[in-house]
Image (cartoon, rainbow, N blue to C red):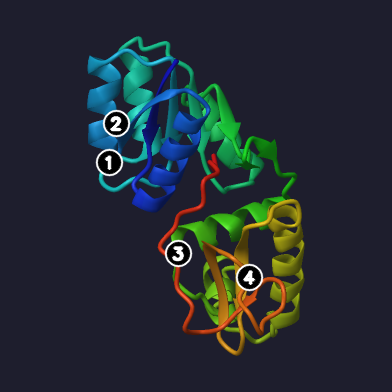
Amino acid sequence: MRILVVEDERKVAKALQEGLEGEGYEVAAAHTGEEGFFLANTQAFDLVVLDLMLPGRDGLEVLGALRKRGLATPVLILTAKDAVEDRVFGLDAGADDYARIVTRSARPLDLTAREFELLEYLLRNQGQVVSREMIARDVWKETARHTPLDNVIDVHIARLRRKVDDSFDKKLVHTVRGVGFVLREEARLSGYGPGTCGPASRSGMSPSWPVF
């Protein structure tokens, strides 16, 4: 089975490609709408996983153009949006379904919509420490911070960590004391508790589960 992944965030695209290839699928990746449109029209695929937020020609434009050309290949929209109107709009444009499945080592993770958005944000910033203020701004869309969200964010991080890490020896979601949070694969460090790491620790490894 051949799958085309159209995703401009290269870290997300790489995680998707590696995860799907690990399951035995043949995967091609495109990082712009134009590139995805070209590949979908010139090569045979059994499935297209299409991000909506693409530079230049966005996902809905690509999808509409593909359907107008008579391409019947199933298309899954890759999105963190939850609004019903967003889903209806995509389905009306010709999408077959919306994909919000998260797996790790072939095990599905039962995430809420907010946990999904939080995990996607950590993945997009993989290896980089993100602060609570950044999460409040970029995930909760709260720019004024007139109502502190630190406790709310900490609760969601704790729930996400349990779902992502509790069943695995290698931990991915870490707290950097006094700074924020980071997604990276590394063993537990001496002197720190579970899910906590020192500011100087580093790992270049990538998570191996697909998020789509």
Where residue 86 sits in the image (x, y, percent)?
Answer: 56, 41
Q: Nearer the viewer, mark 4 or mark 2?
A: 4
Q: Which mark is residue 32?
A: 1
Question: Farthest bottom residue?
Answer: 178
Secondary-structure class at tag 2? helix
The residue that appears at 34% across and 41% down in the rendered structure is 58
The residue that appears at 39% across and 43% down in the rendered structure is 13
Q: Are marks 1 and 3 in contact (CB under 8 Å)?
A: no
Mark pair 2, 3: CA separation: 23 Å
The residue that appears at 54% across and 21% down in the rendered structure is 96
Q: Which residue is mark 4?
A: 188
Task: State left or right for residue 209 relative to residue 12.
Answer: right
Mark pair 2, 1: CA separation: 6 Å
Q: Which mark is residue 125?
A: 3
Where residue 168 sits in the image (x, y, percent)?
Answer: 70, 52
What's under tag 3, amino acid-wise? Asn
